[in-house]
Amino acid sequence: MPQPNDLLRAARERTPSRRTPGCCMSREELAEAVGLWLSERDPQGREYAFDAGHLGKLERGTVRRPSRHYTDALCAILGTTETELGFTPKGTPLRLNGTPRRPQTGVPDPTGELDPDDAERLTVAAICPRRTDAAAVDAIATVLTGVRRLEDETSAAAVLPTVRRQRELIERLATGAPASSRPVAVGLSSEINQYLGWLSIPLGRWEDARRYLDRAAVLALQADDPMRLATALSFQAYAGLRTGDLRTADALSEAARRDTRVHIGLRTYVTYQRAEVLARDDNRAEAVRLLTEADRLVDHLPEPDELPSSGYWYIPAFFLGQRGFVLRALGDVHGARRAAAACLEAMPDTWRKSEWAVRRRQLAEE
């Protein structure tokens, strides 16, 4: 008996109907949209024989993969990828979020190819979340690491759609995962929500940032993950600093420092951040004390290859910039410029378009 294509059906059912507000797309509506999409792009305006019966065969698994042009139409209309629709070609390594349209954007595919075993495991988990295990979650985490690196070389806007799709997948897995795998899935869901919050900040989407970071904090608590909780709180404090909401920045930067079960890199970051908040709040003595403490922590940072994948930027060059922001808040404009300039000089070339590089360049040029 064929296995149903639950991914395709789920994608259709979460796509709003254009005919009936409040309802999802029916098979008939989606089939008609596929035919129209293809006809509009056919040089001769030909009609295509794709109806609800064909779509039903795909959803039931009777037909595992439609022709290339039907696949393209379904991906475009449902706003997803062929992998996410369950159409991975047999024998082809899985690309978690790669799309056939990506080359048109000029942005490299951030996902790379997964190990075939991990690809198969993730495909099974996506179809049946009860089959989720730690290895499937690790496969998504591997892709997330590649996306972070791509953001450094491009922009937040370039990777945002990919990370949103990752969020949909991991939250589906976290919801349906067995008890043994749920904590690790919930933890990664927290990290992806946290990353979406971070990406929303340079785009000025402050409400999105708040919503994602709130979600990240709640999930980190559920997973009992101090590293992810402290990161979500510190990013919320950062958003408060960027928007001039000193009260929020004060409360959340203090909360981010409470749990000492975190990596020294994150501990260093939240200490510099707390010093900047206090300096802006005219608590100069405590700000200087924390600045000195953070400077000492930098001397004990591990080597770059020993850093966690979610904190690969915790290196001395990055923290020179953090020091510059604290000095600026303390009124030492000259010292702030020097720290920012030193940061830019030591920064890896691949980071020069990153959000933190832009702000450090602005500080150096004040």
Image (spheres, helix red, strand yellow):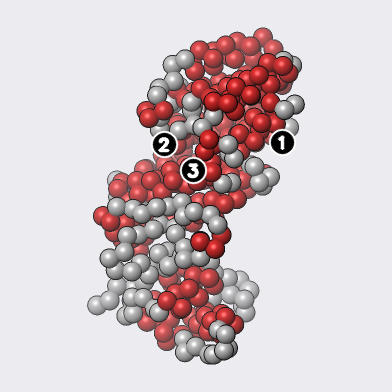
The image's mark for residue 309 is 2
**Does 38 sit above or below residue 223?**
below
C-beta proximity under 8 Å, tags 1 and 2: no
- Number of the front mark, 1 or 2: 2
C-beta proximity under 8 Å, tags 2 and 3: yes
Name the residue carrying label 3: 148
**Does 101 sit above or below residue 217?**
below
Q: Amino acid at mark 1?
A: Thr
Name the residue carrying label 1: 243
- Number of the front mark, 3 or 1: 3
Q: Secondary structure at mark 3?
A: helix
Work out whether mark 3 precedes mark 1 in sequence or the reverse, and give the earlier one. Answer: 3
Q: Residue at x 53, y 35 (%)?
A: 349
Q: Amino acid at mark 2?
A: Ser
Q: Position of residue 354 (x, y in %)?
A: 58, 39
Q: Quadrant for residue 3, please give it.
A: bottom left
**Does 80 sit above or below residue 116?**
below
Work out whether mark 1 precedes mark 2 in sequence or the reverse, and give the earlier one. Answer: 1
Visible residue check, residue 290: yes
